[in-house]
Amino acid sequence: MFTYRIREDLYLKLLEPSDARAVFSLTDNSRDYLRQWLPWVDHTNEEADTRAFIRSVRQGWADQNLFSAGIVFQGSIAGVAGFNRLEHQNNLGEIGYWLGEEYQGKGIMTEATEAFISYGFDQLGLNKIIIKVATANEKSRAVPERLGFKQEGILRQEHWLHDQYVDIAVYSLLNAEWKN
């Protein structure tokens, strides 16, 4: 089983089927908050939906085309982060993430994303890591900005979110930039 310790009270772990209840509960308790930016929340209505997500994440890990992990803070799952896409031909990874509302503002996501960056460059041999974020999602945009990513541009009306299209900011970081 994969675990990656970030600090004493914070680590990443490959999600297990037994985590479905905790991840669903976190999603359900933060539903209104998460739904502002994440369309999948409306399709996660029962624990079985989360179990299906965990199965797909584990299959992606086995197939080496994605890698998502639970973010564990002080013994509880606080969110999920990882490489939503791994493109081995171009040594490219795209990070996505979310945190439960009660875990916001503690630096958890910045530290978890930093761990994924290190893992991506050092263990997976990636050359480039991308983060895509809705332009109006200031908290989420702050993560790549704090970690030295460069904004490559804006994808206009890229995602359908509930009842409207939203623009997406694309950030990237190169391995050579990270090492410096």
Image (cartoon, rainbow, N blue to C red):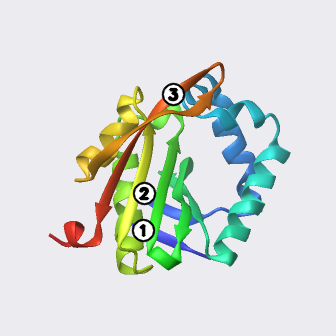
Q: How far apart are marks 1 and 2 (CA)?
A: 7 Å
Residue at left offset 81%, top offset 45%? 49
Which residue position is annotated with label 1?
5
Image quarter of residue 24: top right
Residue at left offset 66%, top offset 23%? 162
Q: Where is residue 70 in the image (x, y as percent from the top left)?
A: 57, 56
Q: Is residue 82 visible?
A: yes
Image quarter of residue 9: bottom left
Which residue position is annotated with label 2?
10
Q: Is mark 1 on a helix, strand or loop?
A: strand
Q: Residues within 10 Å of mark 1 (few under 14, many from 20)?
A: few
Q: Outermost residue toward the top?
A: 163
Amino acid residing under circle 3: Val
Amino acid residing under circle 1: Arg
Q: Which of marks 1 and 3 is in front?
A: 3
Q: Do the residues labelled 1 and 2 touch (CB within 8 Å)?
A: yes
Report the disc number at residue 166.
Answer: 3
Q: Earlier in the sequence, mark 1 or mark 2?
A: 1
Q: Which of marks 2 and 3 is nearer the N terminus?
A: 2
